[in-house]
Image (tube, helix red, strand yellow):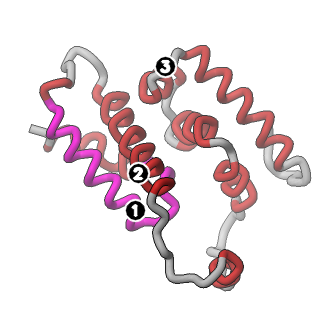
Amino acid sequence: MLDPYIGQYGRRLYGLCRTLCRDPFDADDLYQETWLKALRHWDRYDPGRDFEPWITRICVNTYRSALRWLARAPVFDGFSSPEEKQARLDAIPAPEGEDFSALHAAVDALPEKLRLAVILFYFRDMDLASAAAALHIPPGTMKSRLNHARKKLKEALEHETDLPF
């Protein structure tokens, strides 16, 4: 039933999961949970509409649910302090190639509503209407969030000289 959709949209959905989740294992879980929910709620899908906004909406809502759950039930991550965790992360060598870490850090620092809008529109190349539909917001609200996010990113990255705005 879902096999043709998984074949067609699986890679893009997994890319979205990897973009939303900072941990690859969390991204794998989100990907699997999204397809399970799609299968569970298959009767709600309208074949007359595009599939990608529907599956993206499921993915984003599943991600948001996980964030709410984590906010209520903090998990011990094995580090004695945030400083120890940051020191361990800083010790990992950066991959070769262009360094977009400042941009990714600035996007990660955005409020969640703005971050999701940026990820869907810029990182996942969704058009405005599809991204708005995936987030259950009007296109005008999506435009507003993107504009607000661009302003915040410009402020955060004003010291970067090679990032076009």
Q: Nearer the viewer, mark 1 or mark 2?
A: 2
Name the outermost residue toward the front.
72
Q: Which is nearer the N-term, disc 1 or disc 3?
A: 1
Q: Position of residue 57 (x, y in %)?
A: 38, 33
- The amino acid type, in three-letter code, at marker 2 is Ala
Marks 1 and 3 sit apart, C-alpha to C-alpha, by 28 Å
**Residue indicated by mark 1:** 26
**Disc number placed over residue 66 in the picture, else none:** 2
Magenta region, main secondary structure: helix
Marks 1,3: beta carbons within 8 A: no
Task: Identify whether 25 is placed above or below 135.
Answer: below
Q: Residue at the spot x=17%, y=33% of the render?
A: 41
**Which residues, given as a range, are shown in magenta?**
16-42
For label 2, the SS is helix
Quarter of the rendering containing residue 96: bottom right
Circles 1 and 2: CB atoms closer than 8 Å: yes
Direction from residue 39 to residue 108 in the image, left or right: right
Q: Give 67 or 4, whichever is nearer the viewer.
A: 67
Answer few, some or many: residues within 10 Å of disc 1's Cα (few below 14, many 20 plus, some between 14 and 19). some
Kind of residue sitting beneath label 3: Ala
